[in-house]
Amino acid sequence: MPTTFSSKNINHESFIFKYTLSATAAVIAESVTYPLDLTKTRLQIQGEFSQDVHGKSSHHRGMIATAVGIAREEGVRKLWQGVTPALYRHIVYSGCRMSFYEMLREKVFKRGNDGSFPVWKASMAGLLSGAAAQFISSPTDLVKVQMQMEGKRRLEGKPTRVKNTLHAFQQIVAEGGVRKLWTGWVPNVQRAALVNLGDLATYDTAKHTILSNTKLKDNYVTHTLSSACSGIVAALMGTPADVIKTRIMNQPTKNGKGLLYSGSVDCLVKTVRLEGFFALYKGFLPIWARMAPWSLVFWLSYEEVRKLAGTSSF
């Protein structure tokens, strides 16, 4: 007689269970908001050292104009260029960051009996889980950034670097070996640590504060308010590191070495010197505009998926 599937057979506290739930919610959120990520990446490259096919400096455009320009000049489908490695990244990255955070919260730093979790503990848990998850998923982030820039390269008359996700991985390894897949991992990890400090710590703290000090219940209203708080804090903390990460990953290389920047500090100094301090916040609006709906879709999806799976809310 066939075995009937039952939630009783599932360990709701296991790493793989929580990993699967968070990865599922992340795939939903990434698919919905991906065009904003592509727009953000293009904005951050503006003003770098690029010239078009006629030798003229690339003109600057804002968030909306950039998105419309991509759709008009390259096609609407190009707004999702690079989405495949982006989904791969979030399956690894979000699955790890959420699972690591809960492990740290429950087993290392430990919440109070009343469910309270001090801000400093939440911040440390977010920082550590974000850094570890991003280091593991850094190769997929590198491929995503390079694929996002292919449309722009074609318009500038430059040859295509990669054809698809697998080809991108093969090209990177062929040029610099497996270690090349971790190009830009330092600013990548720095950004993820800051973003997760802002996102996870803020959401966790905001949610507990709302439930403890208001009559609101643990439902979509509380989740929406908490995600709104986490989105803005994460964007403020992560944008400078995101700009540096994007530029290092996108720069041309020779013999495995970057031709524009020697590292994250060099990129930081050159960016501020040539373009001013606020160049570090290039793309802040689309970063926030992406993080806000991403955070909303993710947290609502994650909390609902946890509920459907029969486990406690985050």
Image: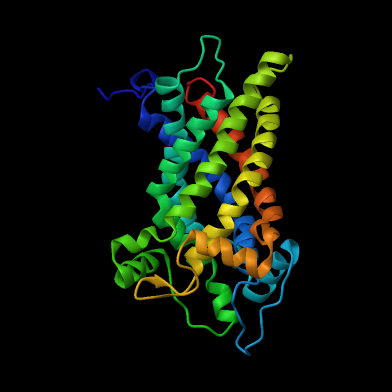
Using the rendered view, name the quadrant where residue 168 is placed.
bottom left
Q: Is residue 82 in view?
A: no
Q: Position of residue 54 (x, y in %)?
A: 63, 90
Q: Quadrant of the C terminus?
A: top right
What is the image's colouring? rainbow
Question: Up-down: is 100 above or below 6?
Answer: below
Q: Nearer the viewer, residue 232 or 258?
A: 258
* Quarter of the rendering containing residue 114: top right
* Number of residue marks: 0
In the rendered image of this protein, does residue 304 appear above or below residue 41? above
Residue 121, can we see it? yes
Question: Outermost residue toward the left?
Answer: 1
Give the residue displayed 56% in from the left and 51% down from the top: 31
Q: Position of residue 47 (x, y in %)?
A: 65, 72
Q: Quadrant of the N terminus?
A: top left
Name the one closer to the observer, 286 or 6: 286
Nearer to the camera, 248 or 14: 248
Q: What is the residue that sits farthest to the top in this orientation?
A: 113
The percent coordinates of residue 134 (x first, y second) are 44, 47
Q: Residue at x 63, y 71 (%)?
A: 75
* Residue at 49% in and 37% down: 127
Is residue 276 toward the left or the right of residue 84 in the image? right
**Above or below, comparing residue 67 to residue 108 in the picture:** below
x and y percentages locating residue 271 in the rendered image: 61, 65
- Front residue of 191/66: it is 191
